[in-house]
Image (spheres, helix red, strand yellow):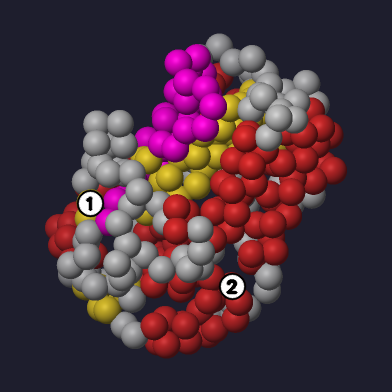
Amino acid sequence: MRIAVSTPNGNVGRHVTRMLVQSGVRPVLLMRHPEHLSDELRDYVDVAAADSWHPDEVIAATRGVDAVYWVDPTPFSADPLGDYARATEAIVGAVRENGLSRVVFQSSVGAEKRGGAGEIDGLASTEAALDELAASSERDLDVCHLRCGYFFSNLALGLAALRAGDLETVLPLDQGMPWVAPRDIAEVVALTLLSTAWSGRRVQAVHGPENLSWAHVASLLTSELGHDVTVRRVEDDVMRQRYLEAGLPPALGEALLGMSTGLRDDFTPEQKRSLVSTTPTTLRSWVRDELIPLL
């Protein structure tokens, strides 16, 4: 089976690539900047220049491919949902034009709402488009949506705030939610790509080892970082202003804010925590192995 990997340098994709190589697969890496390929991978992978927002490039890069691990790139523009629409067009076009038979799509907890969850709505649109394609008579397609929890690696986006010990959220401090290590997601991706035990449409939650609240996270960070770390709950308008002060386009700020507010009130994940959705890496071990070296 010929497997393509999008965003191979991402938090999850870099692990997926190595896992596939270690399993004996020679993956095709879809890279916006092929020159950024690490030297250690050159003898084990093929590289195709492709921007995941450009359907023609993705279609050309996936000719001869059977399966793909697909990630909608993180938008940075003034039209974030438009960016998701372009990424959706790219993967749908690749399936249609090249006869891809399997897609493992990195989605998110909250995509099941199909609206009202900010940036996650873009992932929901990709899910829906792939489902429609799989249900049609024109293509024999197996598709698995991985509904992932909150990435541990999101903490690394605010290193200055962590050093200062001052974090903010719009969520209730005692509200638990799934948190997960990117490497654990990658393991599920690789196993799902390679498994012959499933077909059709599948939804797989990736919930990490336990639900965590921001109060619990602050306590853990305090004990591991060696200084007090507090998390304050702020009003939505305060967080909205933070995004604007950081220079984000208003629509992108709203999309980011909506990921939290959309899952804050009266939301229960469609997939309950189970043996299937629970992955092993704890936040404490991730902080020790990956966050502290960055600080």
Where is residue 172? Give x, y as percent: 24, 73
Q: Amino acid at mark 2?
A: Leu
Going from N to C along the chain, the mark reached first, 1 or 2, is 1
Label 1 residue SS = strand
Q: Counting other residues with Cα less than 10 Å from the Cα at mark 1, is it few (<14), some (14-19), or many (20 or more)?
A: some
Q: Is residue 5 left or right of residue 208?
A: right
Q: Is residue 42 left or right of residue 213?
A: right
Q: Which residue is mark 1?
A: 211
Can residue 55 be seen here?
Answer: yes
Q: Amino acid at mark 1?
A: Asn
The range drawn in magenta is 177-204
Up/down of 194 relative to 129, above or below: above
* Front-lying residue, 203 or 254: 203
Q: Which residue is pictured at 48% across the width and 86% down the height?
A: 241
Where is residue 259? Give x, y as percent: 44, 66
* Front-lying residue, 235 or 152: 235
User: Looking at the rendering, which quadrant does residue 27 occupy?
Assistant: top right
Where is residue 58? Give x, y as percent: 77, 39
Up/down of 133 relative to 24, above or below: below
Q: Which residue is pictured at 69% across the width and 50% down the height?
A: 87
Q: Which residue is mark 2?
A: 252
Q: Based on the picture, tell me whether residue 187 belongs to the magenta stretch.
A: yes
Quarter of the image where the C terminus is located: bottom left
